[in-house]
Amino acid sequence: MTPRIIDIHPHIISADTGRYPIAPQAGQRSNWSQKRPSSFEELIAGMDEAGIARAAIVHSSTTYGHNNDYVLDSVATQPDRFTAVCSFDLLAPEAVQVFDRLLARGMGGVRLFTGGATAQTDGRWLVNPATFPVWERCADLGMAMVIQTTPAGLPMVAELAERFPKVRIALDHCGRPVLEEGPPYPACAGLFGLARYDNVYLKITPKTFDLAQAAPGGAEAFFAHLVQRFGADHLAFGSNHPASAGSMKALITQGQDCLRALSDDDRAWIWGRTAQRLYPMLAD
């Protein structure tokens, strides 16, 4: 059975720097966005080649900072196939007003970006009470929150999951698990502890595939363990294209190899069904 594929973590970069100026968060642009930028049109072509039905496009903070214009303008042209996951300053006094403006333009999710390829903060602002009004808006609307953080930030994810049980939280790159010791992955105790929160979900991306394939026991052991801990209905695929090198078709092939030992039902959840739970606007 070939499951329906929905991608919840591609990025897009425009060649039109006049209309969409480069203004990266922390002032340093990511290497991938310079070396292998992929436009919205190129994303569509790659998705069509790879058999990806729909996508939640994640705003590139390391290219555009808090300016979400490109992703919002793009998804507005095909709202039945795409939604936008936006980033903005949740500590700003006008954060709720910014949220409402982005929502009116088609935002389908919020990403809390503590850093990535260019700079990494300690992320303590994640649990600053000044951010809570936006969380409350997400709870009211049933909107997903995406958190990009390192294993050091997982206790804050737990605090937020407990404080806002109605908000579905998707953790970028599976929380960047440390797998070098192999099963039962003792260094992942903090990550696995999040399974007790029904509103915590994990994004499985090529970064996760790479880590699992390199770990003792390989991908088969890790993903079986992950499904056992969280349930496949709390795991979702994200291509990380073009930050992860290779065509979308190649990234899908890598994922299919890594998930091959799982049941058809588990793979169907990871490839598409969980995505539709996180982003109902991508449902059929």
Image (cartoon, helix red, strand yellow):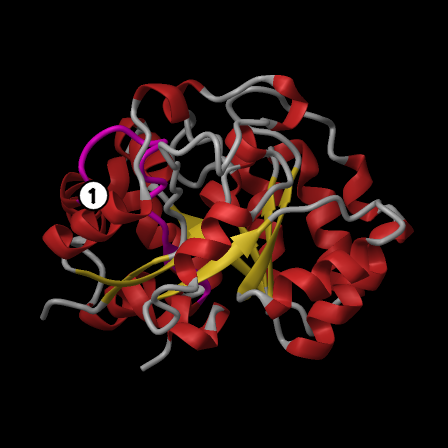
Q: Nearer the viewer, residue 11 or 255?
A: 11
Could you tell me which quadrant the C terminus lies in? bottom left
In the depicted structure, whether residue 190 falls above or below residue 158: above
Whole-percent x, y for residue 10 in the image: 37, 46
Q: Position of residue 37 (x, y in %)?
A: 33, 30
Q: Is residue 168 left or right of residue 158?
A: left
* Residue 116 horizontal side relative to residue 234, left or right: right
The relative height of residue 79 versus residue 99 in the rendered view (above or below) is below
At a point 53% along the width and 27% down the height, the residue shown is 22
Q: Is residue 61 magenta?
A: no
Q: Can you give x and y, in whole percent of width and height, for residue 213 in the image?
A: 26, 33
- Where is mark 1, residue-wise? 248
- In the picture, residue 243 is in which quadrant? top left
What main secondary structure does the magenta stretch of the protein show? loop
Residue pictured at 47% horizontal, 22% vertical: 30
Q: Nearer the viewer, residue 57 or 150?
A: 57
As helix, strand or loop, the secondary structure at mark 1 comes to: helix
- The answer to whether any part of residue 202 appears in the image is no
Q: Is residue 8 left or right of residue 116?
A: left
Task: Report which quarter residue 257 is drawn in.
Answer: top left
Looking at the image, which residue is at 68% across and 46% down? 88
* Left or right: where 90 falls relative to 52: right
Q: Quadrant of the N terminus?
A: bottom left
Q: Which residues are magenta?
A: 234-248
User: Residue 180 location, x and y as percent?
Assistant: 41, 25
Frontmost residue, 272 versus 69: 69
> Amino acid type of disc 1?
Met
Vertical arrangement, residue 16 with respect to residue 260, above or below: above
